[in-house]
Amino acid sequence: MTRRNWWMCFPSKASTAPTRSLTSRSRPQTPDETFDPKALWLNAEHIRGLSVDALSARLLPVVHAAGFSITPERMQAITR
C-alpha cells in the first residue's frame, strides 16, 4: 500500500469541517479550555523525564529574563 493510498483511507476532518471565524463563542472561556489536556500531560511527562542538570539549564535563561540574578549552582539547588 502506498503512502497516498494509506492517507486516502483516513479522510481529514479539517477538510470537511465548516470554517469557523474567531468569535467569542470559539475562544476558550476558561484557562482550562485554553490548552489540550493531552498536550499538558505530555509536556509534564517530558519535564519529569529531564535530569536536574538539564532542567536547571533550561530554566536558567527564563529566570534571568524575569530579572532574577541567580547562579547555575543555585538554580540546580532550587530544581532538586
Image: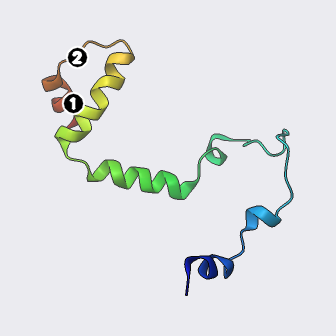
Disc 2 target residue: 70
Position above or below: 19 against 77: below
Amino acid type, mark 1: Ile
In the image, residue 16 above or below residue 78: below
Residue 72, given in percent of the width and then of the height, sits at: 17, 24
Q: Which residue is mark 1?
A: 78
Residue at 27% x, 26% y: name it.
60
Which quarter of the figure is the C terminus placed in? top left
| Residue at 26% over, 12% down | 69
Disc 1 crowd, CA 10 A, few/some/many (<14, 14-19, 20+): few
Q: Which mark is residue 62?
A: none
The colour mode here is rainbow
**Placement of the N terminus among the 4 image quadrants:** bottom right
Q: Are marks 1 and 2 in contact (CB under 8 Å)?
A: yes
Nearer the camera: disc 1 or disc 2? 2
Query: Which of these two is toward me, 40 or 15?
Result: 15
- Using residue 19 as the reference point, say whether residue 80 is left or right of it: left
Mark 1 / mark 2, whichever is N-terminal: 2
Q: Position of residue 67 (x, y in %)?
A: 36, 12
Q: Is residue 73 left or right of residue 61?
A: left
Amino acid carrying label 2: it is Ile
- Which residue is drawn at the image coordinates 82% and 40% (left, top)? 22
